[in-house]
Image (cartoon, rainbow, N blue to C red):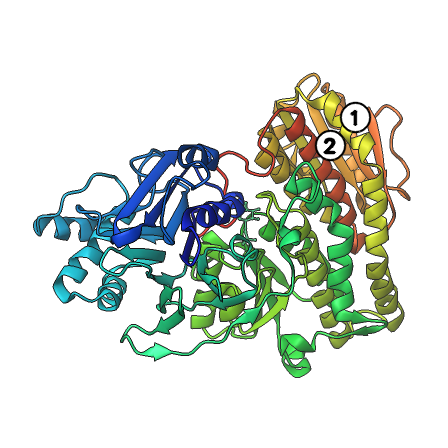
């Protein structure tokens, strides 16, 4: 979703801003623009529809734009079609105030009407032009940029990370955020602002995470933070320990392929961080054993793949810890009026920690007095900061829009919590507890084995490249893997696909099976294999092409099935961690073969900060 970058300091700003924007491309966008304040404070704006390359070509990589202070933006259209006119930055009539914005101003129609009554006119359909002109309105009234920004914040509803240049204050960037991410960096070379750390990591590791309603003033002398009363507040920087390389492609053809191959390491990192030898240590969560023994239900919520992790976890928690679990899509859950006893633990899963609906669900639960645990990848993100406790997954920066390594490390995090609860509640034997811990430590090697066999999946993808409908079926945890496999396929290959609980297919959906339709069965749950095989046979007799992905120990797969892929054996509770790898590869290769933009699939955004 939209990305913003800002720089002020001793160097030409435009190349730095453009470079930062390229690091945010993964967020998804359809147009881009920059505004550079030149000598004397005049502000130049250049915008273009389409990829950043168009903007870079127009400005010769930024060299054509002179000035040491600038802001830039990649826009993912919300209000108004993707076009040069709607692209950011937006400005007031005499271009003395110029702004970029990430988020949504919910009351923009009322604000626009008010501004029109006061004589303002509008050239675009965007809420950001309204935001910019609102700042202009208050600047004219109070003649003071901090006051204009704080008045802006008091009058808008919605989410924003807003960065503003004032012609009267050359070399300075004023910024504020609410519910949209914004990080600030500072070095001797200048001050930086961005939607996400990778955009500025090349220049500084000292990052300030801004809180809601904090105003930031960036200048080449430093950064200063203010509250809405314009009182200066002190903040300390976090030093980022991972390096820029972690967010670079490093020779891989796509980020997605690189991130798929990082999975043995990120799984090992997450396991080893919490499991030391035989000791499972979740003390970092600050959830006391007494509290954990008391909870009577778990509610898991998230969006997209994070929700799918919740579906896997439901089976694992219920089976191991014998606790009732419900899994909720965050965008639904937040508007429901769920029945809560106050003894639940609500787990919010999110890679970015910024997904608007997941954040809103978290806040709703907190307001109802329920304890919340965030399973989050991005350090210092909103969900991580607002939850009662946090379990950070150790996936490192994930750039490709379609999640792979973050999904895998979220699975591990959930297994660890399930094991902890099972142990505390005495629902598994000491011996089985040890077996499961051991099995977790073996997963990275087993994932490597799956990856080593990728050429078989690649070849299969080349045979399936013309398919237009694919069905994934499975039972239990295999069904949970199916929904993630199907999402992956849709996201990046644009092939229509459905995931079905195998037993449910015959209640309608089987009518879609035609000669040659690909039905992919997942078979890792020993007790359920026979049943799923029967369902596959049902589709085979209606002409389906049957492929199965099966645990190496599973028997009873009919010879007439068209393709059988094997994955290493693991305990059934953890099998999603292996099966999903093959399915990620399948989607990846199909996407490449179909000539799609693998890392930045159409219409999708990595971090969905709108509702
Ligand atoms: C977007 C991404 C998905 C992701 C979902 C939730 O739709 O494209 O890959 O699963 O958001 O994101 P989160 O950051 O909350 O895990």
- In this rendering, the count of numbered labels is 2
Residue in the picture at 71% in, 71% down: 421
Mark 1, secondary structure of its residue? helix
Image: 338 above or below 64: below
Residue in the picture at 69% in, 78% down: 283
Task: Left or right? Give the position of 73 relative to 536.
Answer: left
Query: Where in the figure is residue 102, as x and y percent of width and height?
Result: 38, 51
Residue in the picture at 37% in, 62% down: 177
The label on residue 520 is 2
Task: Left or right? Give the position of 412 relative to 295.
Answer: right
Badge 1: how crowded within 10 Å, few (<14), some, or many (20+)? Answer: few
Query: Where in the figure is residue 560, as x and y percent of width and height?
Result: 86, 23
Image: 462 above or below 21: above
Query: Where in the figure is residue 352, as x and y percent of width and height?
Result: 54, 56
Disc 2 and disc 1: Cα gap in Å? 16 Å
Give whichever of discs 2 and 1 has the lower sequence position. Answer: 1
Q: Which residue is mark 1?
A: 459
């Amino acid at each position: 979703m939209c990305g913003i970058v800002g720089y002020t300091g001793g160097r030409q700003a435009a190349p730095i801003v453009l470079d930062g924007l390229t690091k945010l491309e993964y967020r998804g966008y359809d147009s881009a623009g920059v505004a550079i304040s030149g000598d004397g404070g005049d502000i130049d704006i250049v915008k273009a529809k389409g990829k950043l390359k168009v903007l870079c070509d127009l400005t010769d990589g930024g060299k054509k734009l002179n000035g040491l202070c600038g802001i830039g933006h990649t826009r993912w259209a919300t209000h108004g079609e993707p076009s040069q006119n709607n692209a950011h930055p937006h400005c007031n009539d005499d271009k003395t105030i110029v702004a970029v914005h990430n988020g949504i101003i919910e009351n923009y129609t009322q604000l626009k009407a008010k501004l029109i009554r006061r004589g303002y006119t509008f050239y675009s359909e965007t809420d950001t032009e309204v935001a910019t002109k609102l700042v202009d309105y208050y600047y004219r009234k109070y003649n003071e940029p901090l006051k204009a920004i704080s008045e802006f914040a008091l009058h808008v509803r919605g989410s924003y990370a807003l960065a503003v240049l004032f012609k009267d204050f050359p070399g300075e960037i004023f910024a504020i955020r609410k519910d949209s991410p914004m990080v600030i960096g500072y070095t001797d070379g200048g001050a930086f602002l961005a939607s996400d750390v990778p955009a500025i990591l090349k220049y500084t590791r000292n990052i300030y995470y801004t809180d809601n309603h904090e105003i930031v003033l960036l200048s080449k002398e430093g950064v200063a933070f203010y509250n809405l009363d314009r009182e200066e507040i002190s903040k300390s920087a976090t030093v980022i320990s991972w390096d820029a390389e972690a967010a670079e492609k490093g020779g891989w053809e796509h980020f997605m392929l690189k991130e798929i191959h990082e999975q043995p390491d990120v799984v090992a990192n997450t396991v080893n961080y919490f499991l030391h030898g035989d000791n499972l240590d979740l003390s970092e969560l600050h959830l006391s054993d007494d509290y954990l023994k008391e909870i009577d239900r778990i509610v898991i919520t998230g969006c997209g793949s994070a929700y799918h992790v919740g579906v896997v976890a439901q089976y694992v928690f219920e089976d191991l810890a014998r606790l009732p679990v419900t899994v909720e899509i965050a965008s639904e859950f937040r508007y429901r009026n769920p029945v809560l006893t106050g003894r639940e633990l609500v787990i919010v899963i999110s890679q970015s920690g910024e997904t608007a609906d997941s954040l809103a669900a978290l806040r709703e639960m907190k307001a109802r007095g329920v304890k919340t645990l965030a399973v989050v990848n991005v350090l210092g993100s909103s969900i991580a900061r607002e939850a009662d406790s946090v379990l950070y997954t150790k996936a490192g920066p994930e750039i490709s829009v379609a999640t792979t390594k973050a999904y895998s490390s979220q699975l591990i995090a959930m297994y660890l919590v399930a094991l902890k609860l099972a142990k505390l509640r005495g629902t598994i034997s000491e011996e089985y507890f040890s077996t499961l811990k051991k099995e977790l430590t073996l997963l990275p090697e087993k994932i490597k084995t799956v990856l080593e066999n990728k050429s078989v999946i690649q070849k299969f993808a080349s045979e399936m490249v013309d398919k237009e409908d694919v069905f994934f079926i499975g039972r239990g945890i295999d069904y949970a893997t199916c929904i993630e496999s199907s999402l992956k396929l849709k996201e990046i290959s644009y092939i229509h696909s459905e995931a079905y609980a195998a037993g449910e297919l015959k209640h309608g959906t089987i009518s879609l099976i035609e000669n040659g339709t690909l039905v992919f069965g997942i078979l890792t749950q020993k007790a359920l294999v026979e049943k799923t095989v029967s369902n596959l046979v049902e589709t085979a007799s209606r002409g389906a092409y049957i492929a199965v992905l099966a645990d190496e120990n599973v028997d009873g797969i009919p010879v007439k099935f068209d393709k059988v892929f094997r994955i290493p054996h693991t305990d059934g509770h953890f099998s999603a961690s292996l099966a999903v790898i093959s399915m990620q590869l399948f989607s990846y290769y199909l996407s490449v073969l179909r000539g799609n933009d693998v890392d930045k699939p159409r219409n999708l955004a990595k971090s969905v900060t709108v509702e």
